[in-house]
């Protein structure tokens, strides 16, 4: 039994599959130099053989082994290139239901299951999110919350752990997921060394990366609201005034924002302010105090508090990271 079983679906994101391979391959090499046990892993699919990913890329896989009680392996599902509706329909097909049964049996036998991005919907189809907390990519979080009401969807988290179920955000959060699993299975020393070797930055939250316009999709009212807030900075009208401008009640506005984004109107305003602040921190020489005023705060204390709460960082750290990246 391997430490990690990477379960590959037809049409998966090549980047997520490659990230799994690269991180575990690097961990194997690093463990050898550190004189510690090497993690064992393999790429698997239901039937084994050559599997086609997106964009004409293919990968060789092994057939999934039978489940045994006391299983130690961690089943990992890389991000999939499918929208939730198509994915859930696919999970109703015979091969999809077979995968769901295997995942449920793996957890019942004492194993762990992890997934990132839209692959989290596979765990929902397998009945593994009931009564649990999970995350997914932020723009799919409202959909997951709607179809899985018994699951607490924590869209702010980059990686979310609830018992044997580990979930992660967007496609490149798969690196965070793999590093977390590697740390839990093989220890922090190996995980930290691999992260430094591959220049993987630790990101604990995805809240500061959310783009409300994408969350809103084709919701014209919320798109108009977002544009109005952007235009009004730093003097954003009250929520009541914004509702009147859009010819709806405050309650109706809140309902539309919640339906489109899964968040409150106050969160939307805060997110727009935060996004403007990040842009100014990364692309201007304005002082932090001036940036705070430019986005509607009286001083830098409130901005620092918001960045720490939502983004898990500080103005200085953001500015430093931006300057290093140039």
Image: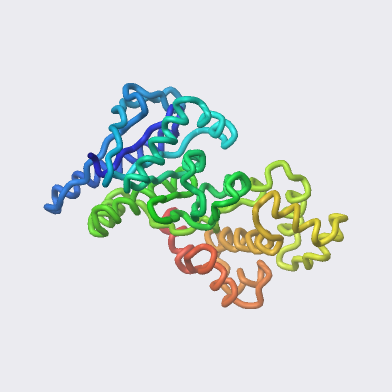
Residue 63 sits in quarter: top left
Q: Is residue 182 left or right of residue 287?
A: left
The percent coordinates of residue 219 (x first, y second) are: 74, 45
Against 318, is 60 above or below? above
Q: Quadrant of the image for the N terminus?
A: top left
Give the residue drawn at x 66%, y 77%.
298
Residue 14 sits in quarter: top left
Q: Is residue 274 left or right of residue 174?
A: right
The percent coordinates of residue 176 (x first, y second) are: 39, 51
Q: Residue furthest left?
A: 35
Front residue of this view, candidates 159 and 105: 105
Give the residue drawn at x 88%, y 55%.
247
The percent coordinates of residue 273 (x first, y second) are: 64, 63
Give the residue drawn at x 42%, y 30%.
98
The percent coordinates of residue 20 (x first, y second) are: 34, 41
Front residue of this view, candidates 269 and 67: 67
């Amino acid at each position: 039994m391997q430490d990690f079983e990477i379960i590959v679906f037809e049409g998966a994101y090549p980047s997520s599959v490659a990230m799994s391979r690269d991180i575990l391959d690097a961990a194997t090499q690093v463990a050898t130099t550190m004189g510690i046990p090497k993690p064992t892993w393999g790429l698997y699919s239901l039937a084994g053989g050559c599997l086609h990913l997106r964009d004409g890329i293919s990968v060789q896989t092994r057939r999934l082994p039978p489940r045994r009680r006391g299983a130690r392996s961690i089943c990992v599902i890389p991000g999939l290139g499918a929208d939730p509706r198509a994915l859930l329909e696919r999970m109703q097909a015979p091969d999809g239901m077979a995968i769901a049964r295997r995942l449920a049996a793996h957890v019942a036998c004492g194993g762990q299951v992890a997934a990132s991005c839209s692959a989290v919907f596979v765990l929902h189809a397998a009945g593994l999110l009931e009564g649990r907390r999970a995350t997914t990519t932020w723009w799919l979080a409202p959909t997951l919350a709607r179809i899985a009401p018994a699951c607490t969807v924590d869209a702010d988290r980059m990686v979310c752990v609830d018992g044997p179920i580990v979930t992660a955000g967007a496609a490149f959060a798969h690196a965070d997921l793999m590093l977390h699993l590697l740390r839990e299975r093989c220890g922090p020393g190996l995980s930290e060394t691999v992260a430094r070797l591959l220049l993987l930055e630790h990101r604990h939250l995805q809240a500061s990366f959310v783009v409300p316009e994408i969350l809103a999709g084709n919701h014209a009212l919320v798109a108009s609201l977002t544009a109005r807030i952007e235009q009004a900075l730093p003097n954003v009208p009250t929520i009541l005034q914004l509702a009147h401008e859009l010819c709806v009640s405050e309650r109706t506005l809140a309902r539309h924002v919640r339906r489109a984004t899964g968040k409150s109107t106050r969160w939307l305003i805060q997110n727009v302010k935060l996004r403007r602040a990040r842009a100014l921190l990364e692309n201007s020489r304005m002082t932090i105090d001036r940036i705070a005023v430019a986005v509607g705060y009286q001083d830098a204390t409130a901005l620092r508090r918001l960045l720490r709460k939502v983004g898990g960082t500080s103005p200085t750290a953001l500015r430093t990271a931006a300057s290093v990246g140039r």
